[in-house]
Amino acid sequence: MSNMTVLKAIRTMGYSPKEMTGHGVRAMAMTNCVQELGFNIEVVDEQLAHGKKGPLRGAYDRTTYMSDRYRLMHEWADYLDKLKAKATSVPVRTDGTDSAEGIAAPVRRSRLSANA
């Protein structure tokens, strides 16, 4: 997937360039897939198409981790659904900031309901 496709999706959801970037989405996915969902970093790297690190791995490592990647994408979708449900059930503070705690990235209630 090209960077422009990711950026278009982010902008379609209503995020400005100052709020979220393609790199930010990839960093968030890497962090949460490893830290929150417990996936091996090599599986997440492969899913994010980071390529093999180092000359030997690049030359000899042909693993694709397909079954793990299918499970990763399923669990990632479930994780995002849980965040969305949690975000939409938390009242928005009157000072304009989000009051939800424990959410991986700030999400505005209006964006979630508009794009549901």
Image: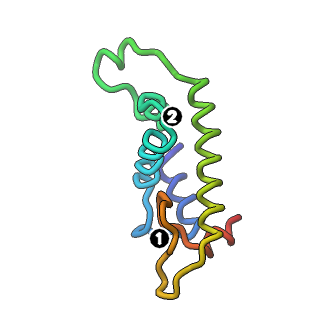
Please identify the quarter of the rendering in which residue 19 is found. bottom left
Is 60 above or below relative to 14? above
- Residue 39, x across and y down, in percent: 48, 33
Is 54 above or below relative to 27? above
- Residue 38, x across and y down, in percent: 48, 36
Badge 1 amino acid: Ser
- How many angstroms separate mark 2 from mark 1 (CA)? 26 Å
Residue positioned 47% across, 79% down in the render? 97
In this orientation, which residue lies closer to the viewer: 42 or 86? 86
Residue positioned 49% across, 41% down in the render? 33
- Residue 56, x across and y down, in percent: 30, 15
* Furthest-top residue in this view: 60
Tag 2: Cα neighbours inside 10 Å, few (<14), some, or many (≥20)? some
Would residue 114 be found to the left or right of residue 39 on screen? Answer: right
Name the element at disc 2.
helix
- Residue 48, x across and y down, in percent: 47, 38
For disc 2, the marked residue is: 47
In this orientation, which residue lies closer to the viewer: 66 or 99? 99
**Quadrant where the image shows the C terminus:** bottom right
In this orientation, which residue lies closer to the viewer: 114 or 88? 88
Q: Residue 42, which numbered label?
A: none
Residue positioned 52% across, 69% down in the render? 100
Tag 1: Cα neighbours inside 10 Å, few (<14), some, or many (≥20)? few
Would residue 59 be found to the left or right of residue 80 on screen? Answer: left
Name the element at disc 1.
loop
Would residue 33 be found to the left or right of residue 80 on screen? Answer: left
Q: Are marks 2 and 1 in contact (CB under 8 Å)?
A: no
For disc 1, the marked residue is: 16
Badge 2 amino acid: Gln
